[in-house]
């Protein structure tokens, strides 16, 4: 089973971030729409399993199915681009500007909301026989989630808002770890196993994921839960989005990027070494952006070739 070491993993992360910022509006929206649809189908499945079996841990163990499917297809979640896009900007990749990054975030948000809302409508129809009966047990459980995780936070005031924000931070610390680990192997089985672990953990711990919530809370409203759209936006979605941004970027993307070296800086050092301006020992003995070096720093392949990302998850 293949394993990509952290220094090369960071290069793949930056490559993926740069690639996403260059996607067309159509492709960005379509990939975000489908990504959220698969993720939220997984969430509906997990809630169904938890409710029908009375075993929340079993639901958490099975929840990553949707996440794995969407990243194997190369689709996008807002939580993932929060982590990868800024790295391409920091690395000064061609076309990776703040404007391109904010455009990507906005389009992915819209696409994710569209995909999640579609699944919310379809599952609400499913849980109520086309709104002709009371919601099933699973539908009622989803409604209770929506009520408890909006009004429940509001009942605690500022302390509730802080708790909500922290749950959003912790969520994307784990979810972005899953996104990054999708690139840690070139083997499908390795990718699946690596992604599964942090995603299972976040779901069981009840952390707040902005895209999953785009399904759970509209579903709850459609099924007659006792909270409002403003409750959802103020006491869940907006703080969760901010927490997800902080968690993914601050605790996943930036630590890896800075501790394992910036790909652009490493390429500069390699080019200087080729020109004889830097001793070969200053060049790391590893593969960097398509550059093969020996332990002594001798270059064996061209460093100027820009690769397409191995994974765009």
Image (cartoon, rainbow, N blue to C red):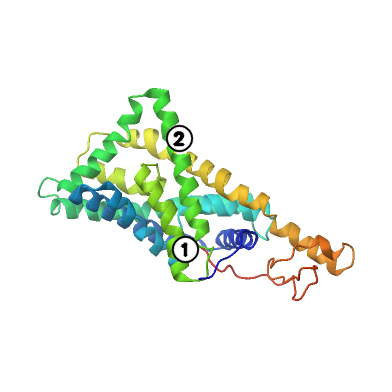
**Visible residue check, residue 107:** no
- Whole-angstrom CA distance, mark 2 to mark 1, is 32 Å
Q: Quadrant of residue 145?
A: top left
Coordinates of residue 153 in the picture (x, y in percent): 35, 30
The residue lying at 67 percent from left, 70 percent from top is 306
Dot label at residue 26: 1
Residue located 42% across and 25% down the image: 159
Residue 236, visible in the rendered structure: yes
Characterize the local packing of mark 2: few (<14), some (14-19) or many (20 or more) Cα atoms within 10 angstroms.
many
Disc number placed over residue 165 in the picture, else none: 2
Residue 290, horizontal then vertical, whole percent: 68, 71
Q: Residue at x 44, y 52 (%)?
A: 198
Residue 62: percent from left, percent from top: 31, 57
**SS label for mark 1:** helix
Which of the marked residues, 2 or 1, is nearer the chain's N terminus? 1
Element at badge 2? Answer: helix
Front-lying residue, 55 or 25 = 55
Instruction: Name the residue nearer the viewer: 116 or 240.
Output: 240
Above or below: residue 240 compared with residue 131: above
Say whether residue 252 is left or right of residue 26. Answer: right
């Amino acid at each position: 089973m293949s394993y990509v070491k952290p220094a090369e993993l960071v290069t793949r992360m930056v490559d993926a971030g740069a690639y996403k910022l260059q996607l067309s509006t159509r492709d960005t929206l379509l990939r975000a729409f489908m990504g959220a649809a698969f993720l939220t189908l997984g969430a509906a499945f997990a809630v169904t399993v938890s409710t029908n079996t009375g075993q929340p841990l079993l639901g958490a163990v099975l929840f990553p199915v949707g996440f794995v499917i969407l990243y194997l297809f190369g689709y996008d979640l807002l939580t993932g681009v929060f982590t990868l896009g800024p790295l391409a900007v920091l690395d000064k990749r061609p076309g990776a500007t703040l404007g391109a990054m904010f455009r990507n975030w906005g389009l992915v948000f819209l696409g994710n909301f569209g995909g999640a809302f579609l699944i919310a409508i379809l599952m609400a129809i499913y849980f109520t026989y086309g709104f002709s009966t009371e919601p099933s047990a699973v539908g009622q459980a989803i409604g209770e989630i929506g009520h408890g995780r909006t009004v429940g936070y509001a009942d605690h005031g500022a302390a509730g808002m802080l708790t909500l924000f922290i749950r959003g931070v912790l969520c994307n610390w784990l979810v972005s770890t899953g996104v990054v680990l999708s690139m840690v192997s070139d083997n499908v089985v390795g990718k699946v196993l690596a992604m599964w672990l942090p995603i299972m953990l976040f779901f069981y711990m009840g952390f707040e994921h902005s895209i999953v919530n785009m399904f759970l809370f509209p579903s709850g409203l459609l099924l007659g839960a006792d909270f409002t759209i403003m409750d959802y936006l103020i006491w869940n979605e907006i703080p969760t989005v901010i927490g997800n941004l902080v968690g993914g970027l601050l605790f996943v993307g930036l630590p890896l990027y800075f501790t394992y070296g910036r790909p652009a800086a490493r390429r500069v050092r390699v080019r200087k070494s080729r020109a004889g301006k830097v001793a070969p020992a200053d060049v790391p003995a590893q593969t960097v952006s398509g550059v093969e070096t020996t332990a002594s720093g001798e270059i064996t392949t061209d460093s100027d070739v820009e690769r397409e990302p191995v994974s765009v998850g």
